[in-house]
Image (cartoon, rainbow, N blue to C red):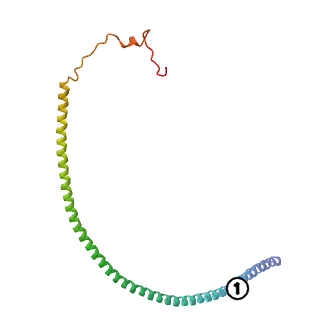
């Protein structure tokens, strides 16, 4: 290998070392960025932990308050249940009284229904008697009308109704209403 080739080889090797140094500089820069990011990440994690701790404390305070409110609500519910129990006993007594009144009314309605049935039966008997009387009156009326019709027919037969003779006119009626012999109608004003 001659001197020129060695210089070219050394220059190539030095370029490789320059490239390696540039890569190492980039790696160093990446490590610095990672280090800064880790510090920022640690700071964010610290702030997040502080916020979580604060939220946990608020939740604990609210849980204690919620337990107190739940206890108070339970006491109020118990008071209402006791009141409802008393009201249910009163309501049962009222319902029993109402049922007794309803039973008395049903018994009264039953008695009234029997009375109403008896009255309806009597009314039906009266109506039936009136219908029988009307039927008898109509039969009597029909007999009277038949007798009157027979009398009228006998009278017509006796006076020869329907046996009128036809008269032949010798002069037609137009002879006095046309021609020179026609008489004009007279006015009442003249």
Q: Which residue is mark 1?
A: 36
The single residue placed furthest to the right in the displayed view is: 4
Instruction: Give residue 63's position: percent from left, percent from top.
Output: 52, 88
For label 1, the crowd category at 10 Å Cα-Cα, with few meaning under 14, some 14 to 19 and many 20 or more, is few
Q: Is residue 169 left or right of residue 117?
A: right
Give coordinates of residue 74: x percent, y percent.
44, 87
Relative vertical location of residue 137 with respect to residue 95 in this rendering, above or below: above
Q: Is residue 161 above or below residue 113?
A: above
Quarter of the image with the N terminus is bottom right
Give left or right: position of 31 versus 56: right
Displayed quadrant of residue 16: bottom right
Residue 175 in the image: state x and y as whole percent. Answer: 39, 11
The residue under the point 22% across, 63% down is: 116
Q: In front here: 52 or 77?
A: 77
Q: Give the residue at x 24% y 70%.
A: 108
Quarter-of-image position of residue 46: bottom right
Question: Residue 17: x, y in percent?
Answer: 76, 81
Which residue is outermost to the front?
190
Q: Is residue 137 left or right of residue 20?
A: left
């Amino acid at each position: 290998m001659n001197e020129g080739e060695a210089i070219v080889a050394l220059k190539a090797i030095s370029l490789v070392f320059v490239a390696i140094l540039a890569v190492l500089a980039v790696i160093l820069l990446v490590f610095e960025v990672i280090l800064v990011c880790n510090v920022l990440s640690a700071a964010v994690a610290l702030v997040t932990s502080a916020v979580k701790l604060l939220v946990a404390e608020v939740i604990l305070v609210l849980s204690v308050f919620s337990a107190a409110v739940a206890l108070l609500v339970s006491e109020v519910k118990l008071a209402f249940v006791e009141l409802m129990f008393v009201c249910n006993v009163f309501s049962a007594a009222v319902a029993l009284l109402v049922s007794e009144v309803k039973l008395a009314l049903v018994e009264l309605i039953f008695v009234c229904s029997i009375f109403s049935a008896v009255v309806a039966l009597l009314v039906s008997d009266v109506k039936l008697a009136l219908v029988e009387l009307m039927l008898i009156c109509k039969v009597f009326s029909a007999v009277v009308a038949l007798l009157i019709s027979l009398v009228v027919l006998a009278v017509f037969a006796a006076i020869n109704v329907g046996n009128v003779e036809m008269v032949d006119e010798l002069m037609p009626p137009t002879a006095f209403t046309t021609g020179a012999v026609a008489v004009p109608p007279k006015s009442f004003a003249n």
